[in-house]
Each structure stands twice: as C-alpha cells, then as structure tokens.
Amino acid sequence: MPSATPQAPEPKEPKIQFHDDKELAAGVLRKDRKATAEWVSLYADSVYTYVRRRLVPRADRVDDVVQEVFLAAWESLGQFEGKGNSSLGSWLLGIARHKVEDYYRRCLRQADMPLEEDYSTSARANPQTLDEALDRQRAERKTHLILSQLREPYSLILLWRYWEKRSLREIAEQTGRSEKAVERLLARAREEFKRKWNE
Amino acid sequence: MNDQPMQDDLFFAEIAVLEDALEASHCAPSRLKARIYSSLVKRQQLSGPLLSLNRTKESGRDLCVFEELVQILPVGERAKRFNCCSVCHARILGEQLEHPPIFWGNCPYVAFRRE
C-alpha cells in the first residue's frame, strides 16, 4: 500500500548484469564481489526452499546447511565451468542434495535403531488412500506438521526414502547400518506417521 | 502374502510427490543471504585478494558510494582489492536485520533485502 508519509528514496537494486551462468560463474571465480552478490541473490531462494523442505524436523539447521551449500559450491565452482549443459541453479541443487544427505547420514548413524521385537506388524495402521483422506492443501499441511512432530530419525528416514527416493540398500550403505535395521527404522517411522495421520 | 509394505510405499510416495508439488517456494531471509555473501567473500580472500575495484568498474559494474571513493583515490591496487564491506556498518545491519536501513545504491546488502 502506498504510504502518505515521505520516505527516503529506495536504493535501486543492482541490475542483473551476468546474462548467462557461465559468465556469472566466471565472475565469481575471478572474485568479482558484484558477481558473488548476484550469485547469492539469484540462487539463495531456490536452495533455501529445497533445504527447508528436506529438513522439516530441523528448521533450526536450515540456515547453516544453506550456507554450507554456497561455501562448498565456491570450492568446486571451477568444476562447474567445465560442464556443458547443466545450469548453475541445478548444479547448486545437486550440492544441496548432497549436503542434506550428509545431514541425514550423520543423524541416522547416531540414532538408536529399533530392535527386531520392537516392530509389531499387528500395530500397523490401516492403509488409506489419499483421495479418501483429505483435500490436497490440507494433506500437504498435515504432512508437514507430522514430519515436524515425529522423532528426528523417523522424519529423516521418511524424507530420505520417499522424498529423496533412496533405496534401503543405499541408505544402509550411507549410514553403516544393516539393510534390515534400516527397514525396521523405516517401518517404525511409517507406523508412527500413519498413526498421527489417522488421529 | 502381506502386501502392507508395498501399500505403505505407495502411500508415502504419493504424499511425497503431493507435498513437493504443492509447497510454495520460499524466499531465503535477507539476513541469511547477507551472511552467505559475507562468508563467501571471506572464503574467497583466503586464496588471494578480491578483484580490484578498478577492474570491477571497468567491466561495467556499479560500485557503492564507499567503493567508488576507494576506487578514485590515488592509492595502490592493493587498497583497491580491499573488501570495503568488511568495515562497513551496512554489512552488520544486513546480517542482523531483515529490513536493514541502507539507503544508498549499489550496496550488495541492498540486493538481499526483501521488499
């Protein structure tokens, strides 16, 4: 809404000056401070959005991980220059994905895995199709809420398995756990998620 | 045969797709962008000086009022590679406030401010 009171003139935002990703990356590599600022301006939002979604239970870690992404990207920006078709944005998201998975790996390595007897198949919730459950918007909010309420290892294993689409074997290799142990943790996480979903 | 795990897999695959498709994109806080920029410049300086302000200006980039001052001063290249932002209060404001009151143009921290 326009304000009636006079205000100091808004400074002009810098124009987008680097017209292609390679040019921008080259500017950052030359340590041109304006290119570096433009790099952050252009890509911080998409990296932030991705990391925020993937670290639902640990919103307090999002800023640190986003910063780690850019610092890691700076260290290997020379490698981007050599790559032909990938955009700087998708290249950064690739690094973000690795950083998120590093976080999952660290947390799940330290997490207590449920013992075999902890997992009761009789306690599984009834399957429920989404169409029958809630409308889309409510489902999305509900998913987000439940993920933020679950114990951290449960949220992370669900995100890793279903949002990042990693197989049990891959997760087991990354965390140094047996596939069986990962499967049990995932089963417990699903059970807990669905219990909350059906509440 | 118990097909529960497969049904669970389908259920979660479906909500993962749904959630990703529906969640709106978010703007990173401007404080975060400011801190990332400051860290990047600091990290860049670890492997040598920044590009000189003369070179930056020559390549058509606009400088802020303080950078402009340093750029026109009769000082050596070394001074012109100095990161002026490291001693500027705009950096501190930008890193701490979501709407930092910075009222001069071409300050890198202005670009991060959310309107």
Image: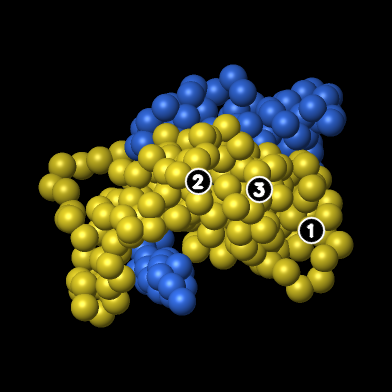
Chain colours: A yellow, B blue
Q: Earlier in the sequence, mark 2 or mark 1?
A: 1
| Residues packed near mark 1 inside 10 Å, few (<14), some (14 to 19) or many (20 plus) | many
**Residue A137: quadrant of the picture:** bottom left
Residue at left offset 25%, top offset 53%: A196
Query: Residue tagged by mark 2?
Result: A116
User: In the image, are marks 2 and 1 on the same chain?
Assistant: yes
Callout 2 amino acid: Glu
**Is disc 3 placed on a helix, strand or loop?**
loop
Query: Residue tagged by mark 1?
Result: A80
Q: Is residue B73 left or right of residue A110?
A: right
Residue at left offset 42%, top offset 43%: A118
Mark in the foreground, 2 or 1: 2
Given the image, what chain letter belongs to the residue carrying mark 2?
A
| Residues packed near mark 3 inside 10 Å, few (<14), some (14 to 19) or many (20 plus) | some
Given the image, what chain letter belongs to the residue carrying mark 1?
A
Residue at left offset 43%, top offset 73%: B2
Mark in the foreground, 3 or 2: 2
**Is disc 1 placed on a helix, strand or loop?**
helix
Q: Is residue B82 left or right of residue B105?
A: right
